[in-house]
DNA sequence: ATTTTAGTATACAGATCTGTATCCTACATG
DNA sequence: CATGTAGGATACAGATCTGTATACTAAAAT
């Protein structure tokens, strides 16, 4: 058997280091040598695990994809219990993310900004990530009984993206609060208002 | 007199070429040699007009800043006459932008994605651009008599950024339509409803 | 008319980038 | 023990990057 669950394998060390450096400095600006230095692994080992830098980039994005979505959804589900409050909790989770010292925006947005060619593996990984985030939101919209869950989910997703970019570019972590306020209005508009009918 | 209004000066040619290439391929991925080739100007002339690549980058961003905002605002003001309809027209302008074949997202968002170091000239140019876009929106919100124009402007700005990023990453030009729908709800919520009181 | 200036063309210096090759060590398993 | 293998250290090949230098040209200003 190769290695089933040995402590941080060289491969994982490389991916984790790559994620950190790509997030911080961008993909093109991060050289293989820099990754090698920071990971404490030699270039030979890197090229034994990945055929090229591009393959390491893809592995790093895919790894971060799963890691981020899992952590994000877990936090949202911990912060609130009902679908509607969870939709709002999304923006509370965002705010803590934005306030971290090592917040460099969304890795996938930044990656696409550096790679405009469509229909590449990189672009698919990035758009898939965004699609799955939208589906997470859609699921909550359906469960809360929104009149038009697809519409609401797409609108909330826009607020989410807008908050990320604004927190990053304009250095306004409170973009999350603004997004939450707008989200509350949109959610309320889509609620069934059963309490009003009694 | 140096040159007051000579036809496209070499400097302008370089800046225009740089804007195009930076937008298409990113800043780090665009080499000086590539800019030289596409602009039909030699490297010596480039370095006679700009001390370094960084200075050319800044000049390109500043040029595009003025160019884009001017064109954007003019389009919005042409499409509608009243403040409220102009706020909605913003998203119609966005849609035509997203549908262009050479749409590569927002140059400033992409630039920040490649340059994380805060308090640099590049970061100031980018955050200033976003600030001025928000002020344009705020002006319209004030003129339309919104109850809380600052709140509304910030919320609409988030929808704008979210639409740009979504159109780019997920290749959904109709993100503009979704944003417009959400904007209409937020705007209506902030309207004075004077018509209802008659 | 002559001299300065803006620009072309091109070569080059030095750094950095991706990817490969060489040589050596530690260790795990047969 | 013996041997294959994962990995460390390092050098290197070839491309590309930023920025400078050299030599020539055309036009503009004095």
Image: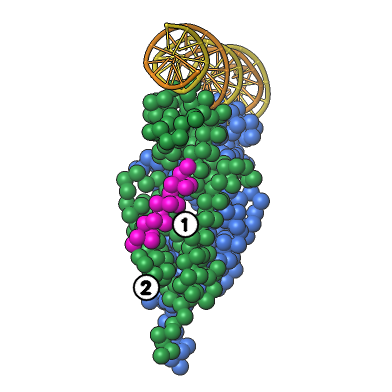
Chain colours: A green, B blue, C orange, D yellow
User: Disc number at residue B148?
Assistant: 2
* Residue for point 53% across, 41% down: A114
Q: Are marks 1 and 2 in contact (CB under 8 Å)?
A: no
Name the outermost residue toward the bottom. B198
Residue B119 part of the magenta-drawn span: no
Quadrant of residue A35 in the image? Answer: top left
Residue A110, how many percent across, how many down? 49, 45
What x and y, as percent, mark residue B97? Answer: 60, 57
Q: CA distance from mark 1 to mark 2?
A: 23 Å
Taking the spot 48% from the left edge, 39% from the top edge, the residue there is A60
Q: Specify the quadrant that holds the C terminus of chain A.
A: bottom left
Instruction: Please name the residue that numbered disc 1 is placed on.
Output: A161
* Magenta segment boundaries in residue numbering: A63-79
Residue at x 63% of width, y 45% of height: A118
A72 versus A13 height, above or below: below
Q: In the displayed structure, would residue A70 be above or below residue A121?
A: below
Q: Residue at (57%, 63%) from the top-left corner?
A: B176
In this view, the residue in front, B179 or A81, is: A81
* Vertical order, B1 against B103 (above or below): above
Kindly state the secondary structure of the residue where label 1 is placed: helix
Image mark 1: chain = A
């Amino acid at each position: 058997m190769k290695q089933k669950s040995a402590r941080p394998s060289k491969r994982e060390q490389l991916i984790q280091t790559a994620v950190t450096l790509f997030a911080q400095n961008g993909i093109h600006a991060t050289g293989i040598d820099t990754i090698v230095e920071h990971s404490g692994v030699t270039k030979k080992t890197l090229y034994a695990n990945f055929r090229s830098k591009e393959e390491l980039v893809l592995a790093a994005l895919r790894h971060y994809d799963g890691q981020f979505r899992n952590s994000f959804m877990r936090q949202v589900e911990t912060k609130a219990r009902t679908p509607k409050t969870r939709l709002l909790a999304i923006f509370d989770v965002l705010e803590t993310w934005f306030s971290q010292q090592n917040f460099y925006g969304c890795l996938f947005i930044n990656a696409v900004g550096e790679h405009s060619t469509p229909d590449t593996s990189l672009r698919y990984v990035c758009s898939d990530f965004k699609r799955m985030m939208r589906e997470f939101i859609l699921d909550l919209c359906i469960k809360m009984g929104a009149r038009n869950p697809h519409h609401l989910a797409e609108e909330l997703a826009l607020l989410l993206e807008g908050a990320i970019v604004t927190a990053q570019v304009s250095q306004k972590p409170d973009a999350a609060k603004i997004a939450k306020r707008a989200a509350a209005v949109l959610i309320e508009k889509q609620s069934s208002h059963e309490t009003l009918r009694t």
